[in-house]
Amino acid sequence: DVLRYATAMEQHTSFKLDGVAFTSVLNACQHLGLAAEALFYLERMKLLRNNNSEEFQSKRLTRGRQRNGAKQALNGPDAVAYGLAISACSKGGRWMDGLALLKELKTTSSLGNSQNLVMAYTAAINGCQEVGEWRVALKILDQMKEDQVIPNVVTYSAAISSCATASANAELQDHGGNEKFEPMHAAISLLRRMELDGVRPNIVTYNSAIKACAEGLNVEGAFSLVQELEYAGLTPTLVTFGSLMTACERVEHVSGAGKVFTTMKEFHLEPNEIIYGAAISCCKKARQSDKAFALLQKMLKDGLSPNAATFNTVLYGLVEEDYIDKALTAYTLMETLLAPIQPSQKTFTILIRAFADDGRPEDAEIFLNKMRVLQYVPDVDLYTVTVTAYERKKQPRKALRLMEQMRDDGYDYYDIPILNTIMTNAVKIVNEVGRNLPD
């Protein structure tokens, strides 16, 4: 609504926004992450600086807001306005624009009080946190020191979080070495630097540091930080244990995952879907799919709602260890819940391949048909492995029938050498044996 009214006033020649109104608009942009709009209105706000005409010269005061110790007309953007615009850029994915605004802010004569400057610097670091630009975040912290602006706990927490994001991004991009571990070490160094600077870490700070350890494959460091925060008189939260479980998952530390559950009970906290999901992934990675399946069942017993991705993790682990029938049981759970979970295409891919490789093409075909009922089009590879399984079991008629179904889905088996060969052999056998062929 604020933005809508601001736009209407801008279009009306009789009404113009004053400094307080522009600040309100920028605040709305900040909450919504509207970077482009924030940049636009900040530019409009700058026109208040040098224009002394009646349409721009507001007589309104800041209604109690203190500017350098006194009430004064807000003629142009101050540190608060810049901070809001920088925050909008950070949330809107335009962190570099936020850095440019921070640089611009430092050249203005009306910087405002130190607290407002801290907010602006912190907003810029938040932009680095979103994209994992941890080195830039550290440079901003150093710049604050040079500018004699003292970072607060929120500033440090954002910088530490940028390190965690950087390590996580390195994992996603399959980077190793320093790309993954250096940010984690930087996060721990920042935590120690806080103590030297007399800034007391809060639970958000520790959670960010634990996440950095998790993404940096430092499970011992993550557990150590949990102990440290307890000694500091802080209470771990679900976010704390979620990051701790992630640390276990990253390095396949199954016993550590069990310790997380035990510690949560001590704090009277119940694990949520995220924590269970990480524990299940941990067991799957460690090739302990039985435990993963047991955790899934416990999760359901606790009244939680695993999504299709969690079921897929369990299914993949079970079939990987040749527990095909248990995988079928897990799938049945998806269909029989009070609120059934719709299988994804990946769900069917896991099961069809498993049944075909296990010499059970009939079961594989059942799931091919289930896919089609749910409007999924099976990949040609799924048809291929199932047809091949029929051919190996010497059931050419069923192989031919399934290839006809392939054609209905738009595939031409003549273009696939292995299927073309199977089709030729199957037709030959059917013609030779005729009605006496067992099926």
Image (spheres, helix red, strand yellow):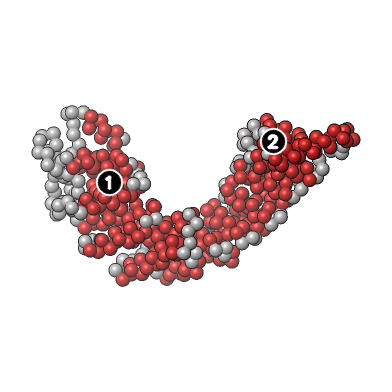
On screen, residue 342 versus residue 167, left or right, reads right
* Closer mark to the observer between disc 1 and disc 2: 2
Which residue shows up at 26% across the image and 50% down it?
A: 100
Q: CA distance from mark 1 to mark 2?
A: 58 Å
Label placed on residue 413 = 2
Q: Are marks 1 and 2 in contact (CB under 8 Å)?
A: no
Q: Nearer the viewer, residue 168 or 114?
A: 168
Quadrant in the picture for the C terminus: top right
Picture residue at 35% right of the left edge, 54% below the top: 128
The residue sitting at 21% across, 61% down in the picture is 147
Mark 1 secondary-structure assignment: helix
Residue ID for mark 1: 85
> Under tag 2, what secondary structure?
helix
Q: Up-down: is 426 above or below 152? A: above
Q: Toward which corner of the image does residue 398 lie, by quadrant?
A: top right
Q: Can residue 390 be seen at all in this image of the molecule?
A: yes
Mark toward the start of the polypeptide (1 vs 2) = 1
Residue 301, visible in the rendered structure: no
Q: Amino acid at mark 1?
A: Ala
- At 37% from the left and 59% from the top, the residue drawn is 134
Residue 169 position within the rendered picture, expressed as x and y whole percent measured from the top left: 45, 55
Q: Of all residues shown, which one is farthest toward the right?
A: 436
Residue 280 x/y as whole percent: 59, 56
